[in-house]
Amino acid sequence: MHNGLLCIVPPYVLEAIAANGTPEQRAWAAATLSLDTEIRATREQAPSAPPQPAADVTASRRIYDADHTTSLPGTLARGEGAPAVADVCVNEAYDGFGATLDLYGQVYSRNSVDDAGLDLIGTVHYSTDFNNAMWDGDQAVFGDGDGDIFNRFTIAVDVIGHELTHAVTQYTAGLAYRNQSGALNESISDVFGSLVKQYHAAPQQTADQADWLIGAGLWTARIHGVALRSMKAPGTAYNDPVVGKDPQPATMDGYVVTRSDNGGVHLNSGIPNHAFYLAAVSFGGYAWEKAGRVWYAALTDPALSANASFLEFAQLTVQKAQALFGADGRQRVHDAWAAVGIETSQ
């Protein structure tokens, strides 16, 4: 169930900065990569306990301040029901946790990330110039960014939703964080992170109104890019001399076989991301109502293997679409996967 450290910024972005940046940029990029690796090794030795049924328990939010150390969780800065504080990062994390709980609770009747009322813990101001956000198996952690390439990581509510969705996956399918199952793990976090943003928007956004960008606002004005990833057009989110060009494929024609990034989990996630986008715009309306229900039903089905391939997950979504929305829904989801090069049986 436990997958260790799960980060929003792919290692290949940090590696590009370590190779192409200024001496200062190279130094903090290398430091972030080193810290990511250190935490990952620690967390993988400490698996989380399975959730215990507690349907009558309501999740509480607790946001802590690490004060630029790596000690977790840090000092409590805002607890459930407490008023806003002067620290914008604390308030953004608190509100982002609330937006994520709202989507899962109000749309999918899920009681927190474990469906058993688990309290949500988050830490802001982690380390110094830490250019990442992560779910470590027990809590979410947000860096402040360096202010040169990255802004603060609480600035994007979809990033918060992304990290907390890693917890949902941890407590459901437990998708192994490698190769295609790992890319599905990343994609599901992007899917529901984007749905958190669309559901939380005022006014709420339909599928054709949404930007389908993951992490918009994270790049500073110095970087030529709009986000970390694009579900609508994978491979187009950024193109910059320092951070490189977005390498995500949109279809299986561009599938990347690599040993890096746990077998390309942040790369190949562009393929199922694009399939979800196509399904959502095909259904129309609010994406969480139909495409989102299909994907959530597939994620929470015990039939979904921890080592599921793209095809296995796609086939399950087609089955769920049939059950939820009939032959029309099945066809829309089948066509979305076919458009990215994955042919499900009819």
Image (cartoon, rainbow, N blue to C red):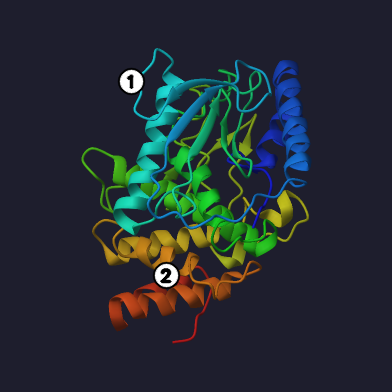
Q: Give coordinates of residue 74: x percent, y percent.
A: 60, 22
Callout 2: SS: helix
Q: Earlier in the sequence, mark 2 or mark 1?
A: 1
The answer to whether 69 appears left or right of 166 in the picture is: right
The answer to whether 167 appears left or right of 211 in the picture is: right
Within 10 angstroms of label 2, few (less than 14), some, or many (20 or more) residues? many
- Residue extending furthest bottom? 346
Q: Mark 2 and 1 residues: CB-CB less than 8 Å, in contact?
A: no
Callout 1: SS: loop
Frontmost residue, 298 versus 145: 298
Q: Give coordinates of residue 321: x percent, y percent.
A: 37, 75
Q: Which image quadrant: the C terminus?
A: bottom left
User: Can you tell which of label 2 and label 1 is closer to the viewer?
Assistant: 1
Residue 62 circle label:
none
Q: Give coordinates of residue 280: x percent, y percent.
A: 34, 61
Q: Amino acid at mark 2?
A: Ala
Residue drawn at point x = 42 percent, y = 42 percent:
59
Residue drawn at point x = 65 percent, y = 29 percent:
242
The answer to whether 226 appears left or right of 182 in the picture is: left
- Name the residue beneath numbered marker 1: 83
Q: Which image quadrant: the N terminus?
A: bottom right
What separation in Å lies between label 2 and label 1 (alpha carbons)?
Answer: 44 Å
Q: Amino acid at mark 1?
A: Pro
- Name the residue beneath numbered marker 2: 336
Residue 212 in view of the camera: no
Image position of 309 with respect to 242: above or below: below
